[in-house]
Image: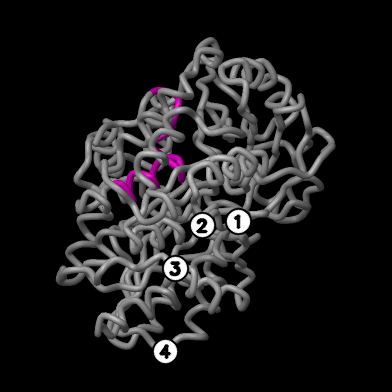
C-alpha cells in the first residue's frame, strides 16, 4: 500500500474510496496505511488552532497535493492507473466494478470481495491565489490548464469545477479538475484481463446525473457548482441564501456570475462519461465476460439498495444486524463495517438533502439498536448544511445509543482532525467479528433487481 502519485488528490472521493476498498481486500482497516503527511501530522495539530488559522492551515496542507499549471501537460495518466491497480491484491476475482465513484458501491464491492476502478479522479492544480466567488476569472484562467491536461492523454475528458459553496477553502489556492477516462489505460486492461477469469462479471457503475456546463473544447468543460447543498438555480441565478452566504464570507457580491451554460454533461465528480462503455463492451466480448450496468441518477439512491443487500447477506449467515454505520463523503471503512456486522449507509455530505436521505431510510427500517455517524468537515458553513441538532435528532432514533464518531462538535464544520481519527474511533465503537462469507455475484445481481426499482436503481445488460 502506497501514497497516491502526483496529480491525484488523497482527499478526493475516488482516491479515498479506492484505498478504503483496497485495504478491505487486503484484510486491513482503512487507517493502517501510508497516508499523506497532511493526515498524519498536520490535521491533529490544526484542531488546536483558532478557526481562521485552522482553515488557512487546511488549505495550505491541501495545496501540497496539487500540481503546478506547468506540470499539467506532463501528467502521467498511465502511471496513476498503475498505482490504482497496484493497491489491490493480485489474485483472481469473481467480479470487478468500474465507473462512477460511490460510497455505497464501495461497500457492495467489499462484500463481494471485488475491486473497483474509477473512471473519474480529481487533479488539483495549485495557483498563487484566487477568488472562489469569481466564476468568470476562474473560467478564463482554467482554460490553459485544461488544454495542458488534454494534451497529457488523448482519451481524457477534463471537467474544471468551481464550487465556492462546498470547496471554498481549497479554491483559495487551487483549481479543481475532475478527469474522466474515455478509454481504458493499459494498466486497467491488463489488471482486468489477469484478475477476472472467463465468464466473470464486470459491473459498470453509471451515475446518470448531469449538470449545466460551459464547453471549452470537444473534451473540456467548466462546471460552476456541484451536487448536494445549493441548487443549480442558486449557483446560476442567485437568491436569498446565496446573498446571505456571500455576505457572511465578506463578499461584496450578492450573487455569482458564471459563464452562460452551453451543454448538459455528466456531473464532474459523480457522473459517468458514456464514452467508456464502448471499450468496455469490446473488452468484455473479447474476454467472455458478462457486462452489467448499475444505473442510477441520485448517488445516494444506491445507499438504500446496498443497505438492504447487506441486511439479507447478514441474515443468510445467521446474523441479525442491529447496528447502522452512517458514512460521510470519504469517511468510511468497509472493513470495519463488515467486522462489526453493521449495515452501512453512505451520505454524500453533511447537507440537509443528505440528512433527508437518512431520515427517509430510517422511516422505512426497523429501529436500530445503535447508530454510529461520521461527519465530513468541509471548513465552510455552506448553503444547505444541516445543523448538528438535525443530525443529533436522527441519532436519537437509535433504540440504545446513537453517537457521532470522531466528530469534535465544538469545531465542526472546521473539524479537520476528524479525517485522521475517525477510523480508530469507529473500531472502538463495537467488538470485531469475522465477516460473513463473501457475497456471491448472483446475490449482488439479485439484490439490485429486488430492491433497485424502489429507489431508482436499475440493472442493464450491455452485452
Marks 4 and 2, how far apart at CA: 23 Å
Q: CA distance from mark 1 to mark 4?
A: 27 Å
Residue for badge 3: 444
On the picture, is 222 further left or further right than 380? right
Q: Secondary structure at mark 4?
A: loop
In the orientation shown, which residue stands out farthest toward the top? 70
Which of 281 and 109 lies nearest the eye of the viewer?
Answer: 281
For marks 2 and 3 on the same chain, the one whose residue lies earlier in the sequence: 2
Q: Please name whichever residue, 255 or 439, is drawn nearer the observer in this view of the structure.
A: 439
Which element is circle 1 on?
A: loop
User: Residue 356's quadrant in the figure?
Assistant: bottom right
| Residue at 57% from the left image edge and 73% from the top image edge | 452
> Mark 2 Cα within 10 Å, few/some/many (few <14, many 20+)?
many
Q: Contact, CB < 8 Å: mark 1 with mark 4?
A: no
The mark that comes first in sequence, 2 or 1, is 1
Q: Nearer the viewer, mark 3 or mark 1?
A: 3
Q: Which residues are magenta?
A: 6-22
Q: Which residue is mark 4?
A: 366
Q: Nearer the viewer, residue 382 or 330?
A: 330
Give the mark, 1 or 4, whose residue is nearer the N terminus: 1
Whether residue 265 is visible here, answered yes or no, is yes
Q: Closer to the N terminus: mark 4 or mark 2?
A: 2
Where's the C terminus, which quadrant?
Answer: bottom right
Q: Which residue is mark 2?
A: 348
Which residue position holds label 1? 228
**Is 11 included in the stretch rendered in magenta?**
yes
Q: CA distance from mark 3 to mark 1?
A: 28 Å
Are there few (<14), some (14-19), or many (20+) residues within 10 Å of tag 4?
few
Amino acid at each position: 500500500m502506497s501514497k497516491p502519485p502526483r496529480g491525484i488528490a488523497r482527499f478526493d472521493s475516488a482516491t479515498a474510496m479506492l484505498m478504503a476498498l483496497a485495504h478491505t481486500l487486503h484484510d486491513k482497516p482503512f487507517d493502517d496505511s501510508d497516508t499523506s503527511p497532511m493526515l498524519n501530522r498536520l490535521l491533529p495539530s490544526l484542531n488546536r488552532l483558532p478557526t481562521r488559522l485552522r482553515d488557512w492551515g487546511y488549505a495550505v496542507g491541501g495545496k501540497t497535493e496539487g500540481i503546478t499549471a506547468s506540470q499539467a501537460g506532463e501528467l502521467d495518466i498511465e502511471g496513476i492507473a498503475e498505482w490504482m491497480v497496484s493497491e489491490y491484491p493480485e489474485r483472481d476475482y469473481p467480479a470487478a466494478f468500474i465507473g462512477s465513484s460511490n460510497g455505497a458501491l464501495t461497500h457492495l464491492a467489499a462484500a463481494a470481495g471485488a475491486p473497483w476502478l474509477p473512471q473519474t479522479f480529481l487533479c488539483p492544480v495549485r495557483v498563487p491565489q484566487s477568488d472562489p466567488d469569481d466564476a468568470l476569472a476562474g473560467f478564463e484562467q482554467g482554460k490553459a490548464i485544461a488544454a495542458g491536461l488534454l494534451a497529457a492523454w488523448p482519451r481524457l475528458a477534463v471537467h474544471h469545477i468551481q464550487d465556492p459553496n462546498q470547496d471554498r477553502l481549497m479554491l483559495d489556492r487551487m483549481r479543481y479538475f475532475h478527469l474522466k477516462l474515455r478509454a481504458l489505460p493499459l494498466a486497467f486492461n491488463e489488471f482486468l484481463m489477469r484478475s477476472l477469469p472467463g465468464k466473470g462479471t464486470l459491473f459498470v457503475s453509471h451515475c446518470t446525473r448531469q449538470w449545466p456546463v460551459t464547453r471549452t473544447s470537444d473534451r473540456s468543460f467548466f462546471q460552476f457548482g456541484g451536487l448536494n447543498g445549493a441548487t443549480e438555480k442558486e449557483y446560476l441565478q442567485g437568491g436569498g441564501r446565496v446573498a446571505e452566504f456571500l455576505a457572511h464570507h465578506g463578499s461584496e457580491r450578492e450573487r455569482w456570475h458564471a459563464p452562460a451554460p452551453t451543454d448538459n454533461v455528466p456531473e464532474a465528480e459523480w457522473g459517468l462519461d458514456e464514452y467508456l462503455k464502448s471499450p468496455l463492451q469490446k473488452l468484455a466480448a473479447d474476454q467472455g465476460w458478462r457486462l452489467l450496468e448499475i444505473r442510477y441518477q441520485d448517488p445516494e439512491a444506491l445507499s438504500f439498495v446496498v443497505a438492504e443487500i447487506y441486511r439479507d447477506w447478514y441474515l443468510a449467515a445467521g446474523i441479525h444486524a442491529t447496528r447502522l454505520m452512517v458514512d460521510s463523503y470519504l469517511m468510511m471503512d468497509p472493513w470495519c463495517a463488515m467486522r462489526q456486522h453493521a449495515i452501512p449507509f453512505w451520505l454524500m455530505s453533511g447537507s440537509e438533502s443528505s440528512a433527508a436521505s437518512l431520515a427517509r431510510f430510517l422511516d422505512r427500517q426497523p429501529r436500530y439498536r445503535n447508530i454510529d455517524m461520521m461527519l465530513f468537515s468541509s471548513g465552510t458553513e455552506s448553503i444547505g448544511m444541516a445543523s448538528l441538532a438535525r443530525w443529533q435528532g436522527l441519532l436519537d432514533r437509535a433504540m440504545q445509543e446513537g453517537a457521532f464518531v470522531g466528530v469534535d462538535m465544538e469545531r465542526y464544520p472546521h473539524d479537520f482532525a476528524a479525517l485522521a481519527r475517525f477510523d480508530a474511533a469507529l473500531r472502538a465503537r463495537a467488538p470485531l467479528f469475522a465477516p460473513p462469507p463473501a457475497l456471491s455475484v448472483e446475490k449482488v445481481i439479485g439484490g439490485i433487481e429486488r430492491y433497485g426499482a424502489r429507489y431508482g436503481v436499475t440493472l442493464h445488460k450491455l452485452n
